[in-house]
Amino acid sequence: MQHAQKLIRYFFIMVVGLLLLGGCAQTWSARVQQFEQWPDNAADATYHIELSDEQQNNLEFQAVADAVRAAIGSVGLVESDADNARFTLRVDFHNPLQRRWVERYQGPMFSPFGGFWGGGAGPFWGGGIYYGPDWVVTPVDVYENQLTVRLLDNEQAGKEVYRATARSESEEEELLMQLSLLAQAVFEDFPGINGQTRIIEKRLDQ
């Protein structure tokens, strides 16, 4: 009887754990800072992406530029050649790897097998559930993704009329996904409010 009760308890804990994991939607967030003095007569205007010497013949930057092209279409701007474009678009992207120390919830761990588990407070056994400190500080390597776009108005002698920087962090490099999401973020609610800083969150399962 006791053996059967233990099996039922183990099964219940495993089912609850799977339900909790299944209910956790993966989300992505970015911090966006923007500045704008957007002209009133810029509807359906054209733009040209200007490359720096470092960006010339750079395959990674081509991916950056493609992500920006896909996102900027939503604000009504159309790509053109340098001689005929009203706006010059400059793009910069960085994703250095940095070390972070973060607190993470550890909680009890379940195992159908015997043994001991624990942490700094000392491990102990609890009938298949092993307990230790609830929170532990662990080192985590994260990519600091940052995308900056600038739009210069050639009808105003190259005056900067829009600048936005979006920043996110990811434990995996995920270059193409991060580029796409950051590009969407810098043009969300374009041109926005001058000097505004906001947090943008998206569900990745949608």
Image (cartoon, rainbow, N blue to C red):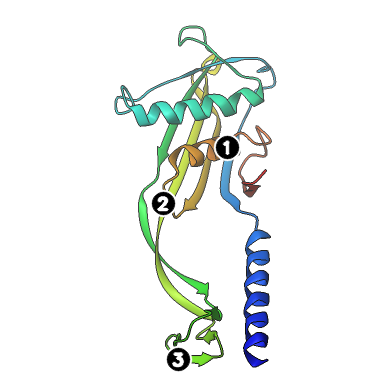
Q: Which mark is residue 4?
A: none
Query: Which of pointers 1 and 2 indicates the residue nearer the eye?
Result: 2
Q: Is residue 144 left or right of residue 30?
A: left
Instruction: Please state, as top left, top right, bottom left or bottom right, where the C terminus lies in the image.
Output: top right
Task: Mark 3 and mark 1 in contact? Answer it, CB < 8 Å.
Answer: no
- Res. 2 in view: yes
- Res. 164 in view: no
- Residue extending furthest front? 1
C-alpha gap between disc 3 and disc 2:
32 Å
Q: Residue at the location (45% across, 91% down)?
A: 121
C-alpha gap between disc 1 and disc 2:
19 Å
Query: Which of pointers 3 and 2 indicates the residue nearer the eye?
Result: 3
Between 26 and 7, the residue placed more toward the observer is: 7
Task: Mark 3 and mark 2 in contact? Answer it, CB < 8 Å.
Answer: no
Q: Residue at the location (45% across, 90% down)?
A: 123
Q: Which residue is mark 2?
A: 143
At numbered mark 1, what does the secondary structure look like: helix, strand or loop? helix
Q: Which mark is residue 186?
A: 1
At numbered mark 2, what does the secondary structure look like: helix, strand or loop? strand
